[in-house]
Image (tube, helix red, strand yellow):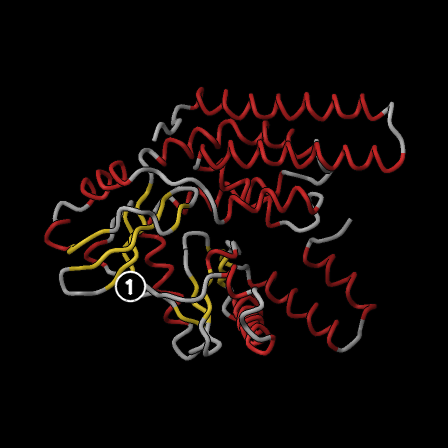
Amino acid sequence: DDLITSALGRFVKVGGLVGRVGVSVLSDQAVGLLRDGPTKQLKKAENMVRNAARIAETLGEMKGAAMKVGQMLSLHEGLFPPEVSAVLSVLQKEAPSVSFEVMEGEIRRELENFDALFESLEPEAFAAASIGQVHRGVLKDGRQVAVKIQYPRADRMVEADLKNLKALLGNLVKMFTDINFEPIWEEVRERLLEELDYLNEAENIRRMAAIHADIPEIIIPEVVQEATTRRVLTMEFVDGIPPAEAVSDQYPARLKDQWGAVLFEFTLRGLVEQKFIHADPNFANFAFREDGKVAVYDYGCMKAIPADLAAGYRQLLHSVLNNRKAAIPEILRDMGVFK
């Protein structure tokens, strides 16, 4: 409940994290000079996992842009060793929640007619994310709803993070990889500022519902406008099989293939046809139905795809499908993706 919201406090928190990880990496490198063979690789892997756990714990407690950056980094397959990505992926589904007393105070401040609208609101968070957390509830008219409530002073946390995180996390990334952090950071920064506005997310939901009206395989929750503000978003509750269960052995491969095809088409349609893509591929943002349909949650992070970029992806797909490999380098150069 003691969320750190000041720029200085968050700078110190992330700076301390970077310092601890840095010392750990350097120490491991020094000791590694005395090791050889399998022992050296084993100890290196153990140290990386230990540091990833430090990162996940700290960023999960901080919420805001700090946690979102950790989530986004964990989704880039190949950016980190598999062991590190596995630990960071905890930020996608097991982030600590803020107490109900705090969040109830937030929703009552946002909705002056809260008691007239809601029959009940569950104290335990249904999901906890980087900028807000979700609670199940029931409206006076009997509708089951999911209510996303923004954390106290989330805008201040994000503003502080945007001042501090670029340099600090850029250095952190360099400890593991030589990837260019700049474009990743710019994308995260733009999307984070948009995510603070739940009215913008509500509009995204309505837009996505309209363009998927004739696509029954995708289920999009309906916005409850009278219980939605810039910092509270109320939607119909759409249930489904959670990802951890969906990938288990209790469901047949045929059904998993169907879910995979729905997700694949959902992404490709957004990229090359609708030019409006769900840009937060956190697995916890999806739920699955036994009839093969997929429910899609969280529309705060959406990306409008420029027409020329969408056309480039379309050309790439055609080149691959038609085995015209020689055309690919030129298409990539036209898209601005080349070395």
**Residue at 73% of width from left, 63% of height from top?**
331
- Mark 1 = which residue? 236
Q: Position of residue 162 (x, y in %)?
A: 48, 32
**Residue at 52% of width from left, 59% of height from top?**
244
Q: Is residue 159 left or right of residue 186?
A: left
Residue extending furthest toward the front: 250
Q: Position of residue 116 (x, y in %)?
A: 10, 53
Q: Is residue 325 left or right of residue 16?
A: right
**Residue at 40% of width from left, 70% of height from top?**
219
Position of the N terminus by quadrant: top left
Q: In the figure, 46 relative to 14: above or below?
A: below
Foreground: 276 or 290?
290
Residue extending furthest toward the right: 36
The image shows a total of numbered marks equal to 1
Q: Position of residue 209 (x, y in %)?
A: 37, 69
**Residue 272 visible:** no
Q: Position of residue 306 (x, y in %)?
A: 55, 59
Q: In the figure, 10 relative to 48: above or below?
A: above
Q: In the figure, 97 relative to 284: above or below?
A: above
Q: Amino acid at mark 1?
A: Glu
**Residue at 69% of width from left, 53% of height from top?**
336
Q: At numbered mark 1, what does the secondary structure look like: helix, strand or loop? A: strand
Q: Quadrant of residue 132?
A: top left
